[in-house]
Image (cartoon, grey):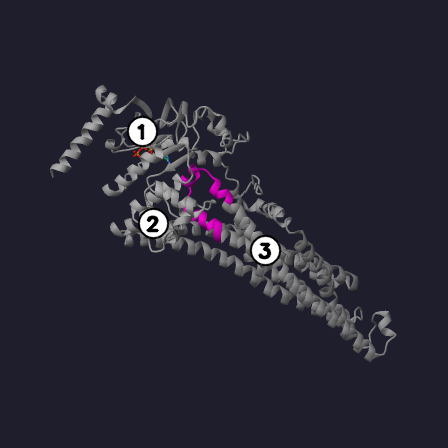
Amino acid sequence: MAVFPNPQFKKSVKSSRENDGSLVLKLLPYLRRYPKLLLLSVSLLLPLSISGAIQPLIIGQAVSLLRQESTWPFLEQLSLDKGLQFLIILLLVTIIIRLVCTSSQGFIVQKLGQNITADIRDDLFTHVISLGTSFFNRTPIGRLITRLTSDVEALGGVFASGAIGVISDAIYILLIIITMFTVQAQLALMLLSLMLPIAALIVYFQEQYRKANYQSREKLSELNSMLQENLAGINVVQLFRREQFNSELFRVINNDYRRATDKTIFHESAVSATLEWVSLVAIAGVLGLGGIFIINDNITFGTLSAFILYAQRLFNPLRQFADKFTMFQAGFTAIERISELMKEPIEIKESDKNIQFLDSVKYRDKIGEICFDNVWFGYKPDEFVLKDLNFTISPGEKVALVGPTGAGKSSMIRLLSRLYEPTKGRILIDGIDIRDISKKELRQYIGMILQESFLFAGDVKRNITLGENYSLEQVQEAAKLTNINHLIEELPQGYHTQLRERGTNLSGGQKQLLAFARVAIRNPHILVLDEATASLDVQTEALIQEALEKLLINRTAVIIAHRLSTIRDVDRIFVLKQGRIIESGNHQQLLDKKGLYHSLYQLQMMGHKESIGN
Ligand SMILES: Nc1ncnc2c1ncn2[C@@H]1O[C@H](COP(=O)(O)OP(=O)(O)OP(=O)(O)O)[C@@H](O)[C@H]1O
């Protein structure tokens, strides 16, 4: 996975040229996965370049033959007809070789590009979904989507536009230069001296383009983030009539994006324009200098014709490179941005102890014990939201967490399911540090029902199994246990009813019931319920309450509840305030204590009586 190891991306113009090389190196591990395609593609380079480089020579020889100038020795032994015939056939052979090689290479390179792009997309997706909750808290979703889609696509463009083609062009240029020098050194030197400053100019524009392109991609990410935020929160946008205000904000970001993109277009056009006039100047130069050589009888007409073609061909690969230039720079920017994401560390590391936690259940005497041992935790360093928590929940015990808003209840269960790690201290399950248990086994051992349940696009069955191998009977069993079988059977296609993304064709209560079945089928030893019954109506809550009672048998449970009436029967209640447990005991003991729990309970009872009175 760590194919993009800790890259140092310096954005200075000076160092970006070295970066290009190191960026390309990052793709090598992916290229190595397709040795056959790569070998085939590389093996076509030489015939392609050689046949291209000798074409002007053949044409030059034909001109010399017609003008009865000196030619290749073996041509002089043939008659004019035969000599011309031979040269025409040779030219045709080189044309066919180029035709076959170019088309085969185009196909191979595109295929290679698509394979690599898909691999990078896979790796990036796997990496991103393994990142910790804190990463998602600080990274806008739209930004991630840009990286996973258009950045990876831009990278694919590097291959599609012919990364191998550039190597081919480089070999082609080299062969032309060598051939030119063997035929006529002065004309070759003149063409070469024109090429060098042009290459430098291209590199300069390239660096400018790269900087502009990075800016433009950043702006695109911002644009996507805003789009995603507005679509996800469309109800709030419309209910609070933010349409015009948000459109105005969008317009500003959209304008920034347009301006950033304009800069990239400028640099792109500058390269094409420069190459256009330079290749014309080169032909004029060859005609001028070559003309003088002809007058002085230094070269033949054949050589001059060959050099006119060389002048054109020498700048052709450069011109092609300019065409690929946009794609290339966008590709480099994409590698840069993808690497940044790839080097994002996976904060919650997998244990290397390989404890078979689930398999060893039968050998443990305490199944479902939870122990918080001196646990401190803060989202930011030194700002603790949980302070020195020490308690043990016995197997099968039902514990409720209560306390004012922001007291730290949700944070506690996030630590328990290892969405975050304690800053200090440790959490043990059945006596084993949860950092030593694999995330997969831990999350199978602890069933979690959150305030808001997320449903995926797919049918009801799939939303319960979540891609794991459960039969329809097992799904029906879980649905029965959580009292939702009747609700599901009433849906148009029962268990095969398609649910839309985010489950908008189900009510809040129905969504929550599905989440219960999702947990029930996994048969966890510990259940965690975060305000799980908050969104249910009285009738559904009665159904679920009955299901819960069945579900809770022989299982340890940690329940967060704001409505204290729902947790009267639990074994123990922890009262949290500003990250500390300030009271604990059962309902009656806490009422007798006349502390915070008592006041919270009194307040809720008063509210309840008032609402009944009204
Ligand atoms: N992702 C986060 N990043 C930074 N701070 C956070 C984050 N989540 C919660 N907090 C802070 O941590 C503290 C505890 O929050 P937590 O959500 O655990 O409280 P809670 O008791 O569950 O509250 P509620 O009953 O309102 O859900 C709060 O001060 C909150 O502002």
Using the rendered image of the protein, determine whether residue 212 is visible from the camera's viewpoint.
no
Q: From mark 1 to mark 3, how far is it between C-alphas?
A: 54 Å
State whether label 1 is within 8 Å of ligand 1. Answer: yes
User: To which quarter of the image does residue 260 belong?
Assistant: bottom left
Looking at the image, the residue that sits furthest to the left is 613
Which of the two discs, 3 and 2, labels the residue nearer the N terminus? 3
What number is the disc on residue 113? Answer: 3
Q: Nearer the viewer, mark 1 or mark 3?
A: 1
Q: Residue type at mark 2: give it.
A: Ile
Residue 552 drawn at (x, y percent):
35, 33
Residue interval drawn in magenta: 126-149
Q: Mark 1 — residue? A: 401
Query: Would residue 271 appear left or right of 67 to someone viewing this image?
Result: left
- Is-magenta flag for residue 148? yes
Q: Quadrant of the C terminus?
A: top left
Q: Residue type at mark 3: give it.
A: Gly
Using the rendered image of the protein, determine whether residue 139 is visible from the camera's viewpoint.
yes
Q: Residue at x 67, y 51 (%)?
A: 35
